[in-house]
Image (cartoon, grey):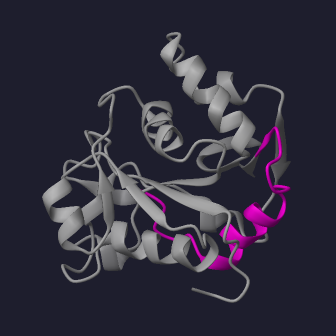
Amino acid sequence: MAVSSRPDLVGVLLTGGSSRRMGRDKAFLGPVDRPLAARIAGVLTEVCGGGVVAVGGDGTRLAGLGLDWRPDDHPGSGPLGGIATVARTHPGTDLVVAACDLPWIDAPTVRQLSAALEPNAPGAVYVDRDGRAQWSLVAIGGPLATQAVARFDAGERSLGAVLGDAVVELTPADPQLIADADRPEDLPPELRT
């Protein structure tokens, strides 16, 4: 854990997507001993002193990588379901949420995001890439994470709708670092094996 990690911050690694466009589970792209999910969890661990939880997907394989894995309470409900799963077990806790399809993400970018979120803030911080909200990486204050659970339970499935106007936009130093990979051609060469 890096010295600049926040002990009050929990990382959420979303590993439950169907990966239809990729054609195989994104969490396990790359080297067998350090696939994408393990690499991103390592990045989150550098920043999130409260631990990192992987949600959804192949629990046996993810736990086999040494990850703290939890089944998604609402599989197939999108990222908000995974966030609600962790927010229920960590009530009122600030979260940094990352999808498992961010092959270029690094600790300085996640640290920049978490630094922009005041502890226990009522809002969220998301990153912008080319004028578009990139919901694959977002920091959510504990009060808003608690509200997200209630909104999810009431039937909401859109993360953007839950975060609403309570967001701060952040442009990373290098926007490529927050690019997600949905198809094989989106991947860096070392992950295309």
Position of residue 68 relative to residue 78, above or below, is below
Q: Is residue 123 left or right of residue 30?
A: right
The one nearer the camera, 143 or 63, is: 143
Residue drawn at x 59%, y 18% as measured from the top left: 151
**Vertical order, 185 against 2 (above or below):** above
Residue 110 position, x and y percent, is 66, 68
Residue in view at x 26 percent, y 67 percent: 29
Magenta highlight range = 101-124
Q: Position of residue 154 (x, y in %)?
A: 53, 10
Instruction: Please indicate whether residue 90 sits to the left or right of residue 58 in the image.
Output: right
Residue at the farthest bottom position: 3
Where does the image place residue 125, in percent across and percent down from the top left? 77, 48
Q: Quadrant of the N terminus?
A: bottom right
| Left or right: 136 in relation to 82 | right
- Measuring from the top left, give residue 82's x and y in whole percent: 43, 39
Residue 12 in view (yes/no) = yes
Q: Residue at x 52, y 20 (%)?
A: 152
Q: Residue at x 62, y 52 (%)?
A: 95
Rendered-image quadrant of the C terminus: bottom left
Instruction: Give yes or no for residue 125 being in the magenta stretch.
Output: no
106 in the magenta segment: yes
